[in-house]
Image: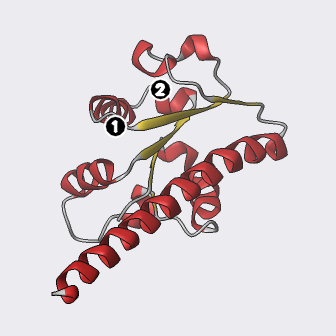
Amino acid sequence: MTDVFISYSTKDEELASELRDRVRSQNLDPFLASVSLPKGEKWAPNIRKALREANWVFVLATSSALASAAVNHEISGAVYGGKNIVPVMVGVSPEQLPDWLSEYQGIIADEGDSAAIWEQVGKVISKIRTEKTTGLLIAAALAGFAAYCVFKK
């Protein structure tokens, strides 16, 4: 199941891949179209499925991404789906974001300071991991209680 959906322009593949690697390093499942889409399958249904599954969406907001129809469709789907959205602005300012994206608190990334970018992104990833762990613990507790009720009889 997808934990984090990464929306990006293919022109920003290197940065998107680094973000995917950082998400994976925290035992989360990221969706990055270039590597997550099964070869030989229709890509649109797979993207919609991953976007539905994910609770979090990172939008690599670059000038290329903001000009991309596909990225704008993904952002619309994320907004409509009530996802937690984090714009990671690289080379663009908050004022350049589309209205529906600008209302989300994001990360303003100075292209020359990658350490600061990854520190901020790491804080969000840590929050996502904590939420996932809490959800799994609650699910395990409920399953244990259900088993107890069944076997108590």
Question: Considering the image in quadrants, where does the C terminus appear?
Answer: bottom left
Q: Residue furthest front?
A: 153
| Between 90 and 127, the one nearer to me in the picture | 127
Locate residue 121: give its quadrant.
top right
Asked if 62 appears above or below 114 in the picture, the reply is above
Q: Label 1 neighbourhood size at 10 Å, few (<14), some (14-19), many (20+)?
A: many
Dot 2 lies on which element? helix
| Between 88 and 53, the one nearer to me in the picture | 53
Asked if 101 appears above or below 24 in the picture, the reply is above
Question: Considering the image in quadrants, where does the N terminus appear?
Answer: bottom left
Residue 73: x and y, percent? 30, 32
Precedes in sequence: disc 2 or disc 1: 2
Q: Are marks 2 and 1 in contact (CB under 8 Å)?
A: no
Residue found at x 51% / y 17%: 102
Q: Is residue 56 left or right of residue 90?
A: left
Distance CA(mark 2)–CA(mark 1)? 11 Å
Residue found at x 27% / y 48%: 52
Residue 140: x and y, percent? 39, 73
All told, the count of numbered labels is 2
| Between 136 and 20, the one nearer to me in the picture | 136
Residue linked to disc 2: 66
- Residue flagged by tag 2: what amino acid is it? Leu
- Residue flagged by tag 1: what amino acid is it? Glu
Residue linked to disc 1: 74
Locate residue 31: give its quadrant.
bottom left
Q: Is residue 63 left or right of residue 98?
A: right
Residue found at x 45% / y 45%: 56
